[in-house]
Image: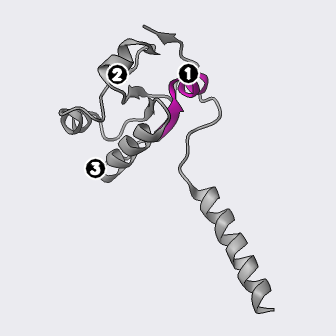
Amino acid sequence: MTKLIKVLTATFLAIFLVGTLSGCATTTMDTKAVGTVIDVRTPLEYSQGHLQGAKNIDIEGANFATEIGALDHKANYVLYCHSGRRAGLALDYMKSNGFTGTLTNAGAIADAANLTMLPIVQ
């Protein structure tokens, strides 16, 4: 009986943890609700293709905190990068610095294009 309880507890915990991960968005969103789209990749990556209208704020750049801090903390933002990792880091930074609007990690640029229905431009 104890072994069954351990197995059920471990299963429940695994399902709970997977279900609560703040992964990348996977559906499309109303473009009116998108708000500002932020590309957190480097300027070089941005120049090679970015979502139309996206603001480039390089998470690895020296001015990241200043540029993010200057944004409206109540607005909605969609963030993307190469894989979603840097966008996730930027999203966590924004949350911990008082951003209260909707923050969405759209993942990679192709995923972000599908989510926002914005074209990739150069």
Look at the numbered discs 2 and 3 and tell me whether their residues touch, using CB distance below 8 Å.
no
Magenta stretch: residue 114 in it? yes
Quadrant of the image occupied by residue 78: top left
The answer to whether 28 is drawn above or below residue 44 in the figure is: below
Q: Which residues are magenta?
A: 104-116
Q: Considering only order in the chain, which callout, 2 or 1, is on the residue closer to the N terminus?
A: 2
Badge 1 local density, few (<14 within 10 Å), some, or many (20+)? some
Badge 3 local density, few (<14 within 10 Å), some, or many (20+)? few
> Circle 2 sits on which residue?
55
Whether residue 105 is visible, yes or no, is yes
Q: Name the secondary structure under disc 1.
A: helix
Task: Tell which of 67 and 48 is nearer to you.
Answer: 48
Seen at 39% across and 43% down, the residue is 91
Q: Position of residue 41 (x, y in %)?
A: 36, 27
Identified by mark 2, the residue type is: Lys
Q: Considering only order in the chain, which callout, 1 or 3, is on the residue closer to the N terminus?
A: 3
Identified by mark 3, the residue type is: Asn
**What's the distance in space between the residues labelled 3 and 1, CA to CA?**
27 Å
Q: Name the secondary structure under disc 3.
A: loop
> Circle 3 sits on which residue?
97
> Circle 1 sits on which residue?
113
Identified by mark 1, the residue type is: Ala
